[in-house]
Image (tube, rainbow, N blue to C red):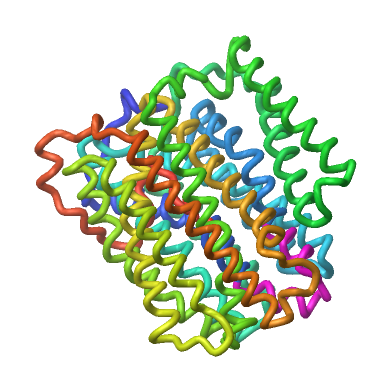
Amino acid sequence: MNNPETLEQIAYGTPRGRWVVTAAVLGTALAFLDATVVNVALPNIGQDLDATLGDLQWTVTGYMLTLSAWILTGGALGDRYGRRRIFIVGTVWFAAASLLCGIAPNVPTLVAARAFQGIGGALLTPASLAIIEASFRKEDRGRAIGAWSGLGGVAAAVGPFVGGYLLSIATWRVIFLINIPMAAAIVWVTLRHVPESMDPRAPRQPDIAGAALGALGLGGVVYALIRASEGGFGQPVVWVTLAVGVIALISFGVAEVRGKHPMLPLDIFSSRQFTGANLVTFVVYAALGGIFFLLVMNLQQAVGYSPLEAGVATLPVTILMLVLSSRAGLLSQRIGPRIPMSVGPLTIALGMLLMTRIGIGADYLTDILPSQIVFGLGLSLTVAPLTSTVLQAADERHAGIASGVNNAVARVAGLVAVAVLPMVAGLSGDDYLDPVVFADGFRTAAFVMSALAALGGILAWFTISNEHKPAANMMEHHCDVAGPTMRPAGHHQPEAVKT
């Protein structure tokens, strides 16, 4: 089996290079697009299945819970058994779970199917990024990552529009069933055009204890936060699952230090750059996860938009991501990631502050559009440099696990935000059906998420350095993307966003 050291490296801009980026982008899009498409369908799902706000939260968090819990395992499996192989397995798994979501007769079945879907996402998401990191020439990886990050961000941002359109012509079930033909296309492209790669030094024996403890730890902590957001921290189940989660995470760390074949080599965190970038990821993606969850619902419930109109309202973000993300990646290569990763989150924070104007009677040109433009500019400036920094700070052979770590951080952050934010904003039960109450809660949430995004920019300034600058010949290339590509391989991005 090939590995990053012996694999024939692919040049960016060649036909094969475009196919590899296409496969990675489409795979990541399958996971992230679905996450944001569901957000715009929540009111329809709630009405059709007679769901409460808590039920709708679980429709989102059920997916993110298993995605977050198993994504480290997904990255490690790719390094051990082949990134292309695990990518294909995850894609097929995701498609099967999507079918179950599409035919779910009630909320418990839908939540269970979404959790099953999250495991598929945990397998394919880190593998897609690792495929790019392992496949492209070193001097081309920054450009490929920029394309992957930018187009991955577009996939997350375009979700509300796609969801709105599908809901305007069909039932909410279509947003899941459409994943099946998309998954078939991804598998076909991957089998024909993507080379296999793995870490040649990774032991073939699976780290079963590490995988189990990691999943139990992440799952326990996140489940406790979700339950606390529904009924407060006084519930015994909250403290029991929180304690189990914390103990499992501590045990996971001990097992990885002492184990002969650790799933997560802890020396990966010896890089200050890697640790700092993941810290910034957690804060920024918590802000993004929270705002994406509530924004499209607010546009429908408070402003009075249809699902399609709510999706169209967010299109400026998509357009800006498509046009500017790869250029932001190139800028980061030229000047280093510190300034883009600092200014970007601060700009996101400003966009979220402007979103506090989105409420009952909001005018699109004066109240909604300015926030989407500023938010889109900040997102474009942040995602590609952040993803590239994470991968460049880790050893090349650990591409899969590095991607898994960063994706896990982003997903857990978004999941915690979705679980806790309604409680912070004073929203519960059927509040999403009351325009006045929901608009007030959204305004509070936007202030909180803005503060988080700004904190991400401040952290980046103090923790990120420009030490990983590329060679001069890398600076001379333009970062145009030919064909349907997505986020740059080797990076995480809302992954959506890495949503």
Q: Which of 428 and 317 lies nearest the eye of the viewer?
A: 428
| Residue under the point 81% across and 65% down | 107
Q: Is 31 located above or below residue 88 in the figure?
A: below
**Is residue 149 visible from the viewing direction of this image?**
no
Rendered view: 26 above or below 85: below
Residue 70 in the image, given as x and y percentages of width and height: 64, 38
Question: In the visual, does 333 lie left or right of 411?
Answer: left
Residue 316: % across, % down = 37, 74
Q: Which residues are magenta?
A: 40-60
Closer-to-camera residue (285/173): 285
- Between 145 and 290, the one lying in front of the other is 290
Horizontal arrangement in the rendering, residue 119 relative to residue 332 (left or right): right
The single residue placed furthest to the right in the displayed view is: 236
What residue is drawn where x is 42% and y is 35%? 196
| Predominant secondary structure, magenta span | helix
- Horizontal arrangement in the rendering, residue 63 relative to residue 462 (left or right): right
Task: Quadrant for the N terminus, please.
Answer: top left
Q: Would you identify the image quadrant in which residue 317 lies?
A: bottom left
| Residue displayed at 38% across by 59% down | 379
Asked if residue 43 lies in the magenta stretch, the reply is: yes
Q: Is residue 228 above or below residue 309?
A: above
